[in-house]
Amino acid sequence: MSGITGMIVRRLWQLLPVMVVATFVVFSLVYLVPGDPAIIIAGDYATEERIAEIRQIFGFDKPMIVQYGVWLTNVLQGDLGKSLYSGEAVTRLIVDRLPHTMLLAVYGLVIGAAIGIPLGILAATKQGGWADKVITTLVSLGVAVPNFWLGILLVSLLALGWKIFPATGATSFFDNPAEAIYYATLPAVALSTGVVAVLARQVRSALLEVLGSQYIRTLRAKGLSQRSILWKHGLRNVAATMLTITGLQVNRLFSSAVVLEAVFAIPGLGSLISYSALNKDFPVVQGVALFLVVSVILTNLIVDVVSAVLDPRVAAAT
Amino acid sequence: MSTTDVSSTPSAKTKAVQSRFNLWAWLRSDPRAAISLGYLTILVLASIFAPWIAPYPPNEQNLMDLLMPPSGAHWLGTDDLGRDTLSRLIWGSSNALYAAFLSVGIGVAIGVPVGVFIGFVGGWIDEVLSRVIDAVLAFPPLVLAVAVTGSLGIGLTNAMIAVGFAFAPVLARTMRAQTLVVKNALYVEAATGFGASRLHLIVRHILPNAIQPVIVEVTLMLAVALLAEASLSFLSLGVQPPEASWGGMLARAYHYMEVSPEQMYAPGLAILFTALAFNTLGESIRVLLDPTIKRR
């Protein structure tokens, strides 16, 4: 098999073991609890009945591998269990909170790409000039700044100081899209810094590599203008790379969302997982971790396929 | 990771570096490395000598001086319990450094041997473990760290073990790729011809020649680990109160920012500068080890 169909089939085949391992990692989280997990999870003042109930929920009386099979079967049927505290279905909790995290991640990614990619192009075309130096410095700062601190500073300056944006909170995108975007702006800006930095750096180095290649030199020797070389040949050749790099940021975005949702009191998946981890609500921790890792894996698959469509060399390489 | 990383194969150029490394000459030629290394040295010394140089005990509460702005008595002011911010900043540095080195150390201890091993033996073991690496890499690192900390129990050491788990596959992947390059080199073939054992090959020839990109990666990872510690402590999953940590200080400062906005500057800047120093040093080492690539 060749071409894009072949590539998709190969990728799906490779995905299977990755999914198995990822689900196993999520499943085994509760086995990392030191001592008798049932007693620890049940808490300090638990009754014997509660401990027995916990043991039964997680199937600690059965061998681990058997229990994994049971758990995975349930997961595949869309049953992620129930919260140990509220008793709500974990899938329900995820569906309720997902829109907030999605809005934040997509918004942050859009801002990050809209600023990062042009900065990378600018730095590459003015290599060594003052614009390049400024951008390179900004990139170093963008990678090193703790984004939750940046979030705090933005709240202090733009929400409490100038009162342009609300300090914390969120509105559902489906109830009121305009207000939801307004509320998500400060956290999305804080979220985007890392993306801006990484994209600017990677786009710069990818573009420099293309611009330094033989055929670009030939085009230049033939008398093509700098502008038409950049737009017709340079950027076209790095388009797939840019897309791949952007796709890889999803992982980073979910990581940052965990902290930023805490800063901005956003009821999304990030605040759900950190709250649940603090309270040892394992079915919720497992459910959210599973949902996020599967989202990352599928996003990367989609990005790979789209890159292959854009640039047949990618399909041939994988 | 940039596309230039792939090209850094060990060859003759690395030999010049290994022959005699002159630290002073390097630092003179690379001021950014000098500044970063100087800053980090001061930070390490501050964390070691914290009991002597911190003006106040880190947990000493002074309920008469709550949320004070910077003054002669308290250079960086006081927090909501009247504790001296400068003293807590100095004490917090030891937690920050401990966290960074512990988690990266765990990542190296797991990732490097696994990477060399699977790169060296290849076959189905490589195939299986590479899929495991792919799977762990798909987890958003902080999500994995939060989840694992929830399981192991809340606290700095457990949180950093969790971060170390997230680092291991990154290092294993780099190490595997390097091992694949090195193991087919002529000198390895020669050593095999002379009847060298597998262990001898790995320890004497492959490891020293494949480790260079890992040294750079490890330095950059210290910055990531530092930011992870700050994030987890901010979420109260890492360093537990009353112990001082930069992330924890920011969490309290955030709570009282309307009363005392000054409190949120120093810990944030400390995290920023330290992460910046690790990153700059990492980039300098990258250039030092492979002068053919340009500084990014």
Image: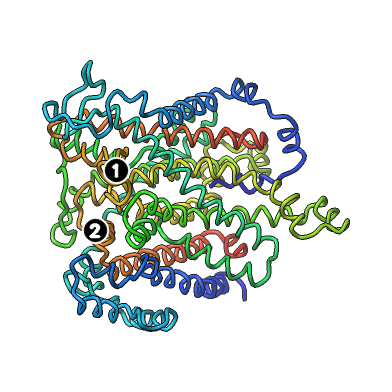
Q: Residues within 10 Å of mark 2 (few under 14, many from 20)?
A: many
Return the residue nearer the eye: A155 or B117. B117
User: What is the residue that sits farthest to the right in this orientation?
Assistant: B194
Looking at the picture, how far across and down is residue A315, in whole percent? Answer: 58, 64
Q: Is label 2 in a helix, a strand or a loop?
A: helix
From the viewer's perspective, is A221 left or right of B249? right
Percent position of residue A12, x then y: 51, 74
Q: Is residue B96 left or right of residue B63?
A: right
State the mark number for residue A132: none
Residue sitting at 53 percent across and 47 percent down?
Answer: B1
Task: Give how far apart the Cα atoms at labels 1 and 2 are.
Answer: 17 Å
Report if residue A270 is visible in the image. Answer: yes
Q: Residue at x 19, y 35 (%)?
A: A156
* B284 vs A200, nearest the viewer: B284
The amino acid beneath tag 1 is: Phe
- Residue bearing mark 2: A275
Q: Amino acid at mark 2?
A: Tyr
How far across and how far down the image is residue B211, in percent? Answer: 65, 47
Give the residue displayed 42% in from the left and 82% down from the top.
A63
Q: Which quadrant of the view contains residue A163? A: top left
Chain letter for mark 1, please: A
**Residue at image mark 1:** A148
